[in-house]
């Protein structure tokens, strides 16, 4: 059991990095400036070390998003064209992907490329706060907060520069 | 003059007349070189095309906007390095002032394109219809937006979608992206599936202005070096690059081969005649031939093409034979008229027949070949005249004659082979039979085969073109009208047809100017479809009923539609942003008071169906560039064969008049036999014959005639027969040392000429020796 009062970023990253592949379900609430009501989506998340991330949205409309290395593909429904994005050519999207992937993999260096990282709480109940330092990311993102327990992520809150925000609740499966 | 049996004595004084004559001849040649206009524009050398449309098309392909595009790839380094090199290269090329634009995808440029398209989206996009702004259509758009906002594409939708619910901008952007698969990384273009930075340049100079393109190439190389490339690799391609590389390569090849063959020939002659003066004596007719040949071409055409000069100099290799034949047949100490009496008739006849044989080239219709023909014929006649009338006193004065090399009788034992000479008919018959079975020699039908561009360069070009999305032209449709706007209107009326062709799979797409830039009329019509702000706001309110959009969500959409109603329509001249300009320019241009649109269909699976669909429209012409140019090449090749036959006929008449007996059959049989064997061997090696092979064949036939006519001389003693054999072998070796060496060139064109001449002259000398010379028995009688 770690010392709960002096829980450090390094320790958190170590735990996250030691974790095997994760499989979870999510519910996300998006507040968009143009809309008077939030949009709710839900689905499943899958992360396989070191760089494979899958987000399957089931409701309200199916969407299958896969990040594998530098390649991001989005499929909406069977038979529809697959959209492929090269992350190397889209720094903004890459930063958003690295936010999630860097946290899941416990890769502090990757997070610190874009953010100032700060940690509060204990190993059982921690809050990681990411504040953009990279100008590209700062154009879109004001702040990202990730709450978790042990090596599990529980909640990801994103506040965008344009006033939009989203809140994703994560529930591990198995 | 004292004389020994083995080695003639030479001193400086005896060679003085030769030295003086050489000085005069070289001065003449130098004078000719400074006085003629030499052009290197390849457009002058190539045929200009049969029909008016084909001419315009070919001119456009050669020198139009597409011909001035240069594609650059930089790879073999880390992506960050490549991006840095790309940026540095762009900056230095921009500064050079040689380019209309230098594009590497850097943000400002792409941004300018995008801003223009976005601003004019409702005028440019086919999405703008009266229905698109109706309540039901807007309702469907908003439902789609809502769905997209729930997806991971939400940021994109917020950026573009809310300001453009009908999706006019995405419809244009899709069209513009077209075949381009370029991606942006670190702010510059990269190939889609490899780490290769890409740049697109357009030169100010025309694509076939070789001198200017040379400066462009140097600027690119310098820019790359200055960018500290490290281990990175620079790839440059484009029509202009090919033209320049081809010219440089041919020049380098010819230069290298000339040096090599001059050295080899000098060594051969030195061994044969043991005198440097022989070299000087041979150079005299050659230099005068060049001088007069150049003057003749300049007078007839007003300029001399660089290629004519290059090939012509090689072609005059035949004239080098004449002084060798003269000196080679001279007995030690013989007065001039003695040698002339023995060989004069044969030499004269050889020259007449060779010149008549070359007349075919003169009338080939290929401007470059006509020049080459005139240059060669003039050169041969002048070379002969100088050899026949100028050289004899000089060589007598210098005491030039062959050195007896070995015993004549031993050499003449080879004549015993003539006992089996009927066997020589076997290869000729076999060759003729083979050609008959395969239905004659295969002519080149494909202009690409004449192209001196190596296959891997063409592959690189196709790759860069695909990666960068630069236009290519295989089939073209030419729309002609009085003005650019009329062209655009005509093209607009064709759009439904092309959509249909695409839907039915006849084509996979088409680059059409009107698709990128609608006519002013169409843009004004679209403006009339746009509702005013109050109407649009009311319709949006109705369309959004029951949806969670805030009232102000579509403010920018309403404002921009309102602004679009009064925008001045875009005209071709307004499209100055780099990507749009480079896309549109090859597709739309004015020439000689008329305006033209070029429609470039892609992936044509069924050309006849396309041709049928377009038939009967008077304002447009369908040109399959490959078919058109190939038909042109086929026509010229056919003509070349015909002129070869005509030249051959004229030469035969000259032969009959000159020989007046059965020897005509042997001489003609020898050269025709050699030609048949050569063509058959080329066919066996799967060489398709181009115009240039046919020209080379003519040269081989001309040289073969020399051999046959010299063997055909009558009542020769052993000594003379041995001299003839040695001299002809020397001549043959010289020809092989010039043309045989061409076979080792990198340039396919030169290689193919070299192989043809080499096979031709080897078969000619063997056949001439066996078939034309007297049999040993006949000699003894």
Image: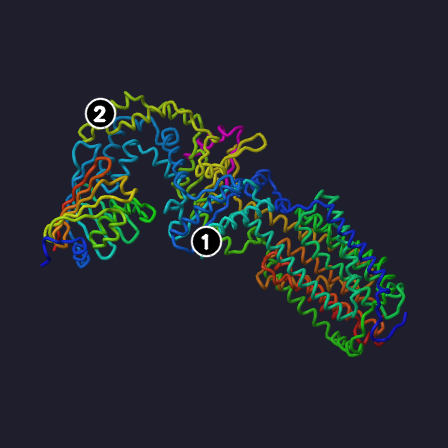
Q: Which mark is residue B541?
A: none
Q: First in sequence, mark 2 or 1: give its number.
A: 1
Q: Which residue is mark 1?
A: B229
- The reply, left or right, for residue B151 in relation to residue A171 is right
Out of B225 and B679, give the one closest to the viewer. B225
Q: Is residue B679 visible?
A: no
Q: Are marks 2 and 1 in contact (CB under 8 Å)?
A: no
- The quarter holding residue B443 reads bottom right
- The quarter holding residue B527 reads top left
Residue B726 lies, with reference to residue B108, above or below; the image says below
Q: Is residue B495 magenta?
A: yes
Of circles 2 and 1, the one toward us is 1
Which residue does the image show at 44% across and 49% down from the upper left? B85
Question: Quarter holding the N terminus of chain B?
Answer: bottom right
Q: Which residue is mark 2?
A: B542
- Residue B175: x and y in percent read 39, 38
Question: Quarter holding the C terminus of chain B?
Answer: bottom right
For disc 1, the chain is: B
Q: Which residues are magenta?
A: B474-496
């Amino acid at each position: 059991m770690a010392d709960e009062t002096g829980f450090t970023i390094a320790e958190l990253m170590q735990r996250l990095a030691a974790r095997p592949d994760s499989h979870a379900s999510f519910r996300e609430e998006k507040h968009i400036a143009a809309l008077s009501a939030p949009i709710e989506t839900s689905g499943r998340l899958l992360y396989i070390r070191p760089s494979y991330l899958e987000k399957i949205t089931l409701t309200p409309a199916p969407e299958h998003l896969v990040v594998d290395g530098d390649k991001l593909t989005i499929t909406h429904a069977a038979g529809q064209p697959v959209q492929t994005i090269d992350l190397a050519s889209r720094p903004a999207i890459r930063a958003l992907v690295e936010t999630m992937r860097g946290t899941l993999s416990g890769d502090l260096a990757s997070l610190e490329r874009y953010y100032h990282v700060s940690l509060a709480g204990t190993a059982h109940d921690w809050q990681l706060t990411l504040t953009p330092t990279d100008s590209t990311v700062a154009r879109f993102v004001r702040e990202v907060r990730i709450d978790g327990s042990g090596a599990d992520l529980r909640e990801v809150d994103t506040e965008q520069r344009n006033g939009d925000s989203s809140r994703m609740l994560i529930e591990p499966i198995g | 003059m004292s004389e020994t049996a083995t080695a003639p004595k030479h001193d400086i004084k005896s060679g003085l007349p030769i030295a003086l004559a050489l000085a005069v001849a070289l001065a003449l040649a130098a004078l000719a070189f400074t006085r003629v206009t030499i052009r290197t524009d390849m457009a002058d050398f190539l045929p200009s095309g049969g029909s008016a449309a084909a001419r315009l098309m070919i001119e456009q392909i050669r020198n139009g906007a597409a011909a001035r595009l240069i594609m650059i790839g930089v790879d073999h380094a880390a992506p960050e390095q490549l991006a840095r090199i790309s940026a540095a290269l762009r900056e230095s090329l921009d500064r050079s002032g040689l380019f209309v634009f230098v594009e590497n995808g850097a943000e400002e440029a792409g941004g300018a394109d995008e801003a223009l398209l976005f601003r004019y989206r409702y005028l440019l996009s086919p999405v703008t219809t009266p229905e698109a702004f109706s309540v039901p259509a807007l309702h469907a758009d908003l439902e789609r937006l809502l769905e997209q906002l729930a997806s991971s594409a939400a940021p994109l939708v917020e950026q573009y979608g809310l300001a453009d619910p009908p999706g006019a901008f995405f419809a244009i952007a899709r069209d513009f992206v077209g075949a381009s698969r370029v991606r942006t990384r670190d702010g510059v273009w990269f190939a889609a599936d490899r780490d290769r930075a890409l740049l697109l340049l357009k030169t100010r100079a025309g694509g076939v202005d070789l001198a200017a393109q040379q400066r462009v190439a140097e600027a690119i190389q310098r820019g790359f070096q200055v960018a500290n490339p490290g281990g990175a690799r620079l790839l440059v391609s484009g029509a202009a690059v090919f033209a320049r590389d081809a010219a440089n390569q041919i020049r380098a090849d010819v230069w290298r081969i000339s040096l090599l063959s001059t050295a080899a020939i000098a060594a051969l002659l030195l061994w044969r005649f043991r005198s440097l003066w022989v070299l000087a004596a041979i150079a005299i007719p050659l230099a005068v031939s060049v001088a007069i040949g150049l003057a003749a071409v300049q007078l007839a055409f007003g300029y001399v093409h660089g290629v004519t000069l290059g090939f012509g100099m090689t072609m005059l290799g035949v004239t080098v034979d004449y002084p060798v034949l003269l000196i080679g047949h001279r007995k030690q100490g013989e007065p001039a008229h003695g040698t002339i009496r023995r060989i004069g008739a044969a030499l004269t006849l050889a020259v007449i027949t060779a010149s008549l044989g070359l007349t075919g080239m003169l009338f080939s219709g290929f401007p470059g070949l006509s020049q080459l023909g005139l240059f060669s014929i003039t050169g041969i006649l002048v070379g002969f005249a100088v050899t026949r009338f100028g050289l004899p006193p000089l060589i007598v004065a210098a005491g030039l004659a062959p050195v007896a090399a070995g015993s004549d009788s031993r050499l003449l034992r080879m004549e015993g082979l003539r006992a089996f000479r009927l066997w020589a008919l076997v290869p000729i018959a076999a060759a003729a039979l083979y050609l008959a079975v395969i239905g004659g020699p295969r002519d080149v039908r494909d202009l690409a085969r004449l192209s001196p561009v190596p296959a891997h360069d063409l592959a690189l070009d196709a790759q860069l073109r695909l990666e960068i999305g630069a236009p290519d032209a295989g089939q073209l449709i030419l729309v002609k009208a009085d003005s650019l706007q009329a062209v655009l209107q005509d093209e607009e009326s064709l759009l439904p047809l092309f959509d249909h062709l695409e839907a039915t799979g006849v084509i996979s797409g088409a680059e059409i100017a009107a698709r990128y830039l609608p006519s002013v009329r169409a843009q004004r019509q679209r403006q009339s479809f746009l509702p005013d702000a109050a109407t649009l706001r009311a319709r949006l309110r109705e369309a959004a009923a029951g949806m969670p959009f805030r009232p102000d969500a579509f403010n920018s959409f309403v404002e921009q539609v309102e602004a679009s109603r009064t925008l001045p329509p875009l005209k071709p001249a307004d499209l100055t942003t780099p990507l749009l300009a480079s896309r549109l320019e090859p597709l739309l241009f004015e020439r000689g008071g008329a305006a033209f649109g070029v429609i470039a269909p892609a992936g044509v699976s069924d050309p006849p169906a396309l041709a049928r669909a377009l038939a009967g429209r008077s304002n447009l012409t369908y040109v399959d560039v490959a078919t058109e140019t190939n038909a042109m090449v086929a026509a010229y090749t056919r003509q070349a064969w015909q002129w070869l036959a005509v030249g051959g006929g004229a030469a035969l008449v000259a032969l009959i008049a000159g020989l007046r007996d059965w020897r005509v059959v042997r001489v003609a049989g020898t050269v025709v036999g050699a030609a048949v064997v050569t063509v058959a061997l080329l066919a066996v090696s799967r060489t398709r014959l181009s115009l240039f092979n046919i020209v080379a064949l003519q040269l081989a036939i001309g040289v073969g005639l020399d051999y046959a006519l010299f063997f055909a001389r009558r009542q020769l003693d052993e000594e003379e027969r041995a001299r003839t054999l040695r001299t002809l072998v020397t001549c043959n070796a010289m020809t092989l040392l010039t043309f045989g060496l061409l076979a080792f060139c990198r340039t396919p064109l030169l290689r193919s000429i070299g192989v043809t001449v080499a096979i031709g002259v080897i078969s000619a000398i063997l056949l001439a020796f066996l078939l034309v010379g007297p049999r040993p028995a006949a000699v003894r009688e």
